[in-house]
Image (cartoon, rainbow, N blue to C red):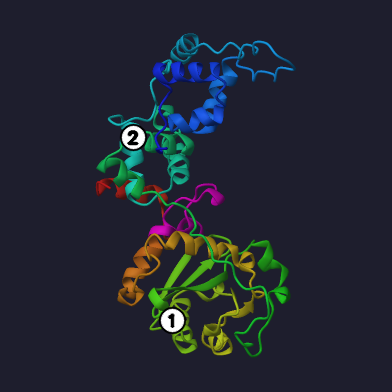
Amino acid sequence: MGKIYKQLSIEERALIQTQLATGVKPATIAMGLNRSASTISRELRRNGWRRPKTPRGPGRPSVTGGYCAEAAHKRAQASTVKPRVERRLRPGTPLWAHVMRYLKTGYSPEQIAGTLALVHANTPSLQVSHETIYTAIYAMPRGALRTEVIGWLRFGHAKRRPRARGEDRRGKIPDMVSIHERPPEIEEQLVPGHWEGDLIKGAYNRSAVGTLVERTTLFTVLSKMDNASAEAALSGFSHVLNRIEAQKRLSLTYDQGREMAQHRRLTEATGVNVYFADPHSPWQRGINENTNGLLRQYLPKGSDLSGFTQEELDAIAWQLNTRPRKSLGFKCPAELFTPDAFDFKQHHAALFALGH
């Protein structure tokens, strides 16, 4: 059976009626028509067919519920009507042009919907829900354009491989401070300055990029790493953290990866207190895990990450930091982390001035 569903034809319905009259079971009819058994069962159910009862003695079998191919086909045609209202989001309209521009720059449908609601608050014709955007994209006819547009979407998080639940064999990091000893203000996310960190690794784990996400504003910082060693992590994280003002680099929550073995030296170099999550507990650093999923659009799995310069990584982080986020009330991380240095309206105007 193909992936594209087609309505039953009058010929198929006639064959269904004929085979039912001879006692053929619906599942067998479905196989003969190369159709799903559920397609045939729904067709029979909505047209009043009832399975005949087994006769108790000799004589003619009972009638098979009264399925009529002609009547069923007329009913199906009558149910197939054109929509009364033309689709709001369709190619050739100003709204479509706005949505395509945002998609091309990496915005998700939710971010587009939130941005349009803010920027065009007084123009309902230029507002749309994220569900409508998804529906319009997947309703496009198959072809190169549809493939290109779908390619602009972020398809969500990659599936995680199950992790071993047994004994942790990575070895203990000396002088670890548990996540359970963090001050309450970190958990409450009231004040910016508390970060979550991790590494994104490239092909065969031979290259890596450090990721840091501020818990309150979702502001993201990327760090170039020579490799995934403890020395490389110390050097890379120290470099990018020290570019941030001291009152906004207070703590870092990390997993128990060996690359953080030099955490005491990192604290000495940056003033950042390091806390360690429990083994196999990615939800304790959920903000960072989510951000890593978004970053895979730019740093795909199986690629060599060693070719990225720090300037290129800064540019990738800036794209995330200047996108509106639903969890922030469709404000940008940069708008909250550096309110005196970033103006979303100016950024939005510049974005469209460049023709994106």
For residue 140, which numbered disc appears in the image? Answer: 2
For residue 236, which numbered disc appears in the image? Answer: 1
Residue nearer the viewer, 13 or 282: 13
Q: Quadrant of residue 89?
A: top left
Closer to the eye: label 1 or 2: 2
Q: Quadrant of the N terminus?
A: top left
* Residue located at (64% from left, 87% from top): 172
- Horizontally, is 64 left or right of 84 in the view? right
In the rendered image, the vertical position of residue 271 relative to residue 53, given as above or below: below
The secondary structure type at the circle numbered 1 is helix
Rendering coords of residue 289 (x, y %):
54, 64
Residue bounds of the magenta highlight = 319-340
Q: Are marks 1 and 2 in contact (CB under 8 Å)?
A: no
- Horizontally, is 79 left or right of 251 in the view? left
Q: How many labels sit on residues?
A: 2
Rendering coords of residue 270 (x, y %):
52, 83
Query: Is 333 inside the magenta-drawn segment?
Result: yes
Badge 1 local density, few (<14 within 10 Å), some, or many (20+)? many
Rendering coords of residue 10 (x, y %):
41, 16
**How far apart, in angstroms, are the residues tagged by discs 1 and 2?**
45 Å
Residue nearer the viewer, 63 or 333: 63
For residue 179, which numbered disc appears in the image? Answer: none
Type of the residue with mark 2: Met
In the rendered image, the vertical position of residue 54 relative to residue 108, given as above or below: above
